[in-house]
Amino acid sequence: MTTPTTLTALQRRAFAAALRAAKQDAYCRQVGGFAIACLSDGSIDWFPLGQPPHRGGEPDRNAVILGKWRWNHRRWSRIA
């Protein structure tokens, strides 16, 4: 499984794009945060707080969470 330190250049680009998209999403602000995960097929995606990583509606039990962020009504902050 891919860990955060062994992301390929393409995955790092996808991570940056997912981070930008999630930070601009109004629903993520409304629910208070989001997580970015590396799915079992190697793709990078983000999920609003409270939703497990999933592909096509099915939970991806082998996904690795790369980072979590929360919204504190002023700015985004990374959490563990």
Image: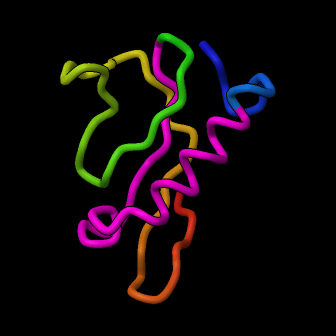
Which of the 4 image quadrants contains residue 7? top right
10 displayed left or right of 14: right
In this image, 22 relative to 78: left or right?
Answer: left
Quadrant of the frame with the N terminus: top right
Q: Nearest the camera: 47 or 65? A: 47
User: Magenta span covers which residues?
Assistant: 12-40
Q: In the displayed structure, would residue 8 be above or below residue 75?
A: above
| Residue farthest along the bottom direction in this orientation | 74
Quarter residue 80 falls in: bottom right
Residue drawn at point x = 41 percent, y = 82 percent: 72
Q: Magenta stretch: dominant SS?
A: helix
Instruction: Tell me residue 15's x, y (percent).
Output: 63, 40
Residue 37 position in % (x across, y down): 49, 34
Q: Position of residue 21 (x, y in %)?
A: 50, 54
Q: Is residue 36 magenta?
A: yes
Q: Position of residue 78 (x, y in %)?
A: 57, 64
Confirm whether the magenta stretch covers residue 37.
Answer: yes
